[in-house]
Amino acid sequence: MNIKDGIIHDCKLYGDFFEVRPIEELEKLLTGERYYKAQLQSLLLNVNISEYIYSLKNEEFQQMFFSS
């Protein structure tokens, strides 16, 4: 992720997972958003991450960004 001045300017998700829908859709959704926990939590309320990454829960996805 490329973050500048608190904004996600570029997002590329890599990993050893099964894609259900194109991961580029999720990357595009995150690009341009503010990199703040509350902002991303709000954005992801209407997104089912497991529709993109098989069997991954929204909470687990968010933990990858904010581990502490």
Image (cartoon, rainbow, N blue to C red):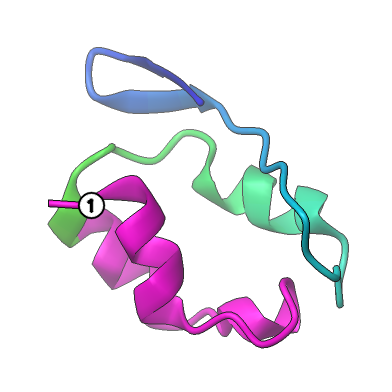
Foreground residue, 29 or 20? Answer: 20
Residue at (72, 42) in percent of width and height: 14
Q: Position of residue 35 (x, y in %)?
A: 28, 37
Left or right: 30, with 55 as reference point:
left
Say what amino acid the circle numbered 1 marks. Answer: Ser
> How far across and how far down the image is residue 8, in percent?
42, 29
Q: Is residue 20 magenta?
A: no
Q: Residue at x 86, y 77 (%)?
A: 20
Report the residue marked by disc 1: 67
Where on the picture, by quarter, is residue 26? bottom right
Q: Secondary structure at mark 1?
A: loop
40 left or right of 56 in image? left
Left or right, 54 with reference to 61: right
Q: Looking at the picture, does residue 58 appear above or below residue 37?
A: below
* Label total for image: 1
Query: Where residue 18 sits in the image (x, y, percent)?
Result: 85, 70
Is 59 included in the stretch rendered in magenta?
yes
Of the pair 3 and 56, the residue shown nearer to us: 56
Question: Which residue is situated farthest in the top direction here?
Answer: 4
Q: Is residue 27 left or right of residue 68?
A: right
10 Å crowding of disc 1: few (<14), some (14-19), many (20+):
few
Answer above or below: position of 44 versus 45: above
Q: Residue at x 32, y 61 (%)?
A: 63
Q: In the rendered structure, which segment of residues is drawn in magenta? A: 39-68
Give percent across and percent down for residue 61: 45, 66
